[in-house]
Image (cartoon, grey):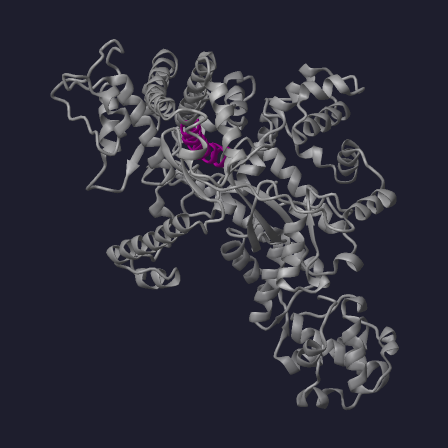
Amino acid sequence: MRQEWSPEELLASWTLVDGDWKLVANKTGATRLGFSLLLKFFELEGRFPELLEEVPQVAVEYVAGLVKVPAADFAKYSLTGRTAEYHRAQVREALGFRPATLEDEEQLTAWLAKEVCPVEMVEDRQREALLVECRARSIEPPGRTRIEKVLVAARNRWEAAFCARAIERLDEVGVARLLELVAEDNEDGAALLALLKRDPGAVGLESLLTEINKLNDVRKLGLPEGLFVDCSEKLLAAWRARAIKMYPSDFRDTAEDVRITLLAALCSSRQAEITDALGDLLIALVQKINARAERRVERQLTAELKKVRGKEGILFRLADAAIGKPDEIVRTALYPVVGEKTLRDLVAEAKANEKVFKAKVRTTLRSSYSNYYRQMLPPLLRTLGFRCNNTAYRPVMDALALLEKYADVDGKTRFYDAGDAVPMDGVVRKDWREAVVDDKGKVERIPYELCVLVALRDAIRRREIYIEGGLRWRNPEDDLPGDFEATRTVHYAAIRQPTDPEAFITDLKRRMTDALDRLSGALADGSAGGVKVTTRHGEPWIKVPKLEKLDEPTGLTALKDEVVRRWGVLDLLDVLKNADFLTGFTDEFASVAAYERTDRAILQRRLLLALFALGTNMGIRAIVATGEHGESEAALRHVRRHFITVDNLRAAVRKLVNATFTARDADWWGTGTACASDSKRFGSWSSNFMTEYHARYGGNGVMVYWHVEKKNVCIYSQLKSCSSSEVAAMIGDFCGTARTPRSSRTTSTRTALPWSGSPSPSC
């Protein structure tokens, strides 16, 4: 029971009513107070307290005032003995409860195995559900030992039923293939199991082909579709997390039915995850090919531009004249410095260079794709199943069908046949038409394939096309509520959108037109605050001026000095090391290999060094060069490759977070839910008005600063600049919502404040 109660809550929950006074009328002293508290405690919790300390002290003082007995007398009341048993019987009779019997325990076990265990893995929540069910059945819960036995029996019964259902859906061949993976002396099976546990490599052709081979190997196991269709994602994730940390010998030590189910859960989950990883790699690789070509051409043109004589001097004279005469018109200020004809020639040359830039980008793209990246297309089309729910307009799907038709055709065949229907609208951008279609109207394969890949990337990102067998890139209709079609009106009302698509589009057009009109008006009358419409790579671009630097807040230097004076400067590696000594989070890092023979103490040191190198962006090579730890770069890279995976990191973070919650001081943090705060970068379109380039993450996006409570519910968020202060965002939330200090204790993982270091939602 919680220990903090407000006066209003005490009045509502702990006040004795008419029937209660009749029960305490014949009792005096400590017995009167103890019975009264026992009665109200059972009303609230549905059980009796095991210790006197479970009863909140504020409640003891409040009820003591009601029954006119000193609060200190409650310590004299005994929860055991004949008197206590008699009082319990009185409370049960008054509230309509009865003691639990063996039959009740059997029924509760069956109920837990059927209703709770399939959807709830956490033991504490299972126990809470059991207590709630006892209360609903008007049964006094059994003792702690009996409750634990009921929970264990329910989990065992559910696990046996779950394994039996999974094995029933697997045929004999499928079961044999799974068992063969962990059979003794089966090096191929152990290698496949180790490969399954590995995360995808860096974005590149080699990683893409490796994931394709991995997915094909998993599919050879022949797992049936819908193997775990009727179990919750949380349940499947729990079995997967259990299996991914096991070595082949660990699998062999389990019962056969559990072994089969663990392997099936691991392979089924990883099959979907590898499919998603292929989708991610495809999107990133297409972007990488385009970005690399643009950067290469930009470097070439920049070098050529520097070779042209006179341009730097012209630019300097223009800038000097503009700064010296900022209020004069262009003809008066600039034309005398640089003639009008010269400026027109420069503009014409710039436009010609823009056209040359696009042409060179296309040529570079074609060269890199045809010589290297084109080999990914046939296996990609054979492995991934791209699907679209739009039956009326599907140009990208038609283009993919054409590419699949020509997948086995010799690459030297330059053009598509004249009789083939080649979709152009929705696939080939206008600036690529001249590169795709020649003077005779023939469509060239290589540039067309590039256009299809770009269109496919965009279609996947906007969920127009989904990948069969994936999770994140799955059919978007699977994300809809099960009763969506039957209660479509209710769901549309919940998101405040019309059911008529024409009405939605009309309203969206109106709002966008109004917003653009306001922007145009502000640009015209000069009230846009320095916002300008320019061009970037030949495309319209909205440029927002940088904000002026603010003065440093008064007292900030003094605050920093005081923090250093009190706590000094701690080495971050020492903080990481001590956190591991206190929590043992490095125990969560299991190897993806079939076995690991490195001594655990040595492995712990190497893990901490590798984690420090990665977490600080210092890099493994730098940590080896600067540290006096005796570890080689090869040893640390072995640990990085075999131990530091997404699953292991999540398990370690979970353990560290739970230990933090357990160790925190209630006098400082309170007994309520604490709140973690951090910012996270979300990718966004480069044309988005709020998009910024983030130097740390190396890409365009937006930063969202959010506050997340213990049960992972976002209770506050705000969009912030990539360069703005996270501490300011945290304090801004505190000031903006006018919370009391007791309920708004927040922490940030990247601040210099003394309470930094608490768990972050973005970990």
Answer yes or no: is residue 581 visible. yes
Q: Give the quarter of the figure containing the N terminus.
A: bottom right
Count how many numbered circles sit on residues in the image: 0
- Residue 449, horizontal then vertical, whole percent: 29, 22
Residue at x-position 82% and y-position 45%: 563
**268 part of magenta stretch:** yes
**584 part of magenta stretch:** no
Residue at x-position 61% and y-position 30%: 250
Answer yes or no: is residue 468 visible. no
Figure quadrant of residue 651 = top right
- Residue 693, horizontal then vertical, whole percent: 52, 35
Q: Give the quarter of the figure containing the C terminus.
A: top right
Residue at x-position 24% and y-position 55%: 502
- Residue 320, horizontal then vertical, whole percent: 53, 29
Figure quadrant of residue 648 = top right
Residue at x-position 78% and y-position 90%: 26
- Residue 327, horizontal then vertical, whole percent: 49, 41
**Relative to 674, is 611 above or below?**
above
Q: Which residues are magenta?
A: 263-284
The secondary structure that dominates the magenta segment is: helix
* Front-most of residues 444 and 73: 444
